[in-house]
Amino acid sequence: LTGYTDGRYFARVAVQEPTFLILTALAAGPLHGYGVMREVEALSPDRGRLRAGTLYAALDRLTEAGLVEVDREEAVDGRLRRYYRLTEPGAAALDAEIARMRRQASTAAARLRARHAT
Amino acid sequence: MSGLERWYRRLLLAYPRRYRRTRGLELLTTLLDASGPEQRRPHWRDAVDVVATGLRYRFALPGGRWLATAVVFVALATGALGAGLGARLGWRGAPDLPTDDALSASAERFTPGWQAGAPDPDDIRPFRIIGNWLSSAPVRMLGGDTWRDTTGMVISPAATPSTAALAQALDRLHAAGWRTDPTREVGEHTVVTAHRAGIIMVVAVQSARGERSVFYFVYQREEPRPVLPLTIAGALLSGALGWLGAAALLRRARGRARGVQALLVAVAIPALGLLVPATATTWLILASGHPIDPAAWPPPPAWAAYVTELGRMFTVAGAFLALLVVLMAAVAPTARTYSPGRAP
């Protein structure tokens, strides 16, 4: 996925389902790792839980691509919690992906309607 | 520290140390947050996910085509060395090849109407065999042959025509306890392969002038069964370790000052260059297979490239420079900022 926003290009990221769900989870506001996992589970209860290793590999890729960035860090009971937020290019990327999915869904629905009409 | 936390800390060892320094505590917090209140051990799916992702980070190729190529080459070089060591280990179980005198004596014994000293005493001698053209060319360039413990050959003139001579030779072989494969024609030679107690003898007979014939006896040790699995295991294990080591070295080098990085590159290039001949030769030997056929002589063993004079000299010099690169990367000062590495 490539895009152009705020006068700069953002990196290419393959938007697979977990990536899309992570970007969607962060769209409402900053979340820490476990918060993202819970939000993804709520968004897509059928796909099963997002595992921690997979989540952080995806967060690393998204951070490297400039779509996500660290919002703040907190230490609670001696444990480190790092919050992530969507960047502007991240929001643009999510927007572009939503538009692409809408187009695909419309095409699929139109073809299904045509099938039922015949 | 709870038992569950200890388990997770152990699993996180799958990640590179630098990654653990920047992400370890955060990952641990998330894993503990996601665990149940009564949970004592990690769920197997979480364990697999953490270990698999950690290993992906360890194996992740560094950015840039040249660095990635360097890591792949290091894996090939260490893989070749591991294949050689594995093959060497496998061949330890093979019987010794008969001595030169014993080879000459058995050639005399199996050659019908053997004529001592004819046509030239120098023609009746054991000598070493080099592999087929694919493997022999680079081996010859690297300094010749030094593995006479794997193959021997005797040329022996017979006083009778080839067809009759071979029939007599087969009778003598069977009487001496050799088991023979069916006879076959290979070019101008009639060939039969005989086996006994871990030794293979390829007998080739060719017609010669004056109703005579010439026998070629090629002796080899039968390849022990463990050779192939040990060669493959050695190549895979050493190749993987080389890949991991090179990737770790590059991650470490990223944190060094630019001057240090330039110095590392300046030493690493000749180090890799010196390892090219033995690496290329070994992979050529491994790719050429083991045909038991006089028309395509069996290739030398997988360690052959490392025992030739030039091959050994180049490899030792390359390994020394590679060690120097590792030491320099370990002790050189760190730059002010560094990136923990790329996501896999």
Image (cartoon, coloured by chain):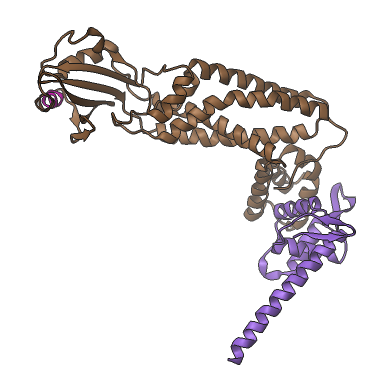
Residue B215: quadrant of the picture: top left
Question: How far across and how far down the image is residue B66, in percent?
Answer: 68, 37
Main secondary structure type of the part rendered in magenta? helix
State the residue at coordinates (28%, 19%).
Answer: B153
Determine the residue positioned at 75% across, 33% down. B252
User: Which chain can be seen in brown?
Assistant: B
Query: Could you tell me which quadrant the N terminus of chain B lies in?
Result: top right
Which residue occupies the foreground of this view, A8 or B227? A8
Horizontal arrangement in the rendering, residue B193 relative to residue B39 (left or right): left
Q: Nearer the viewer, residue B103 or B234?
A: B103
Using the image as rendered, state which of residue A52 and residue B1 is in the foreground: A52
x and y percentages locating residue B176 in the rendered image: 15, 22
The answer to whether residue B306 is above or below residue B226 is: above
Q: Position of residue A61 (x, y in %)?
A: 75, 52
In the image, is residue B233 part of the stretch drawn in magenta? no
Q: Does residue B197 appear in this view?
A: no
The hue of chain A in the figure is purple
Could you tell me residue B26's position as x and y percent? 80, 48
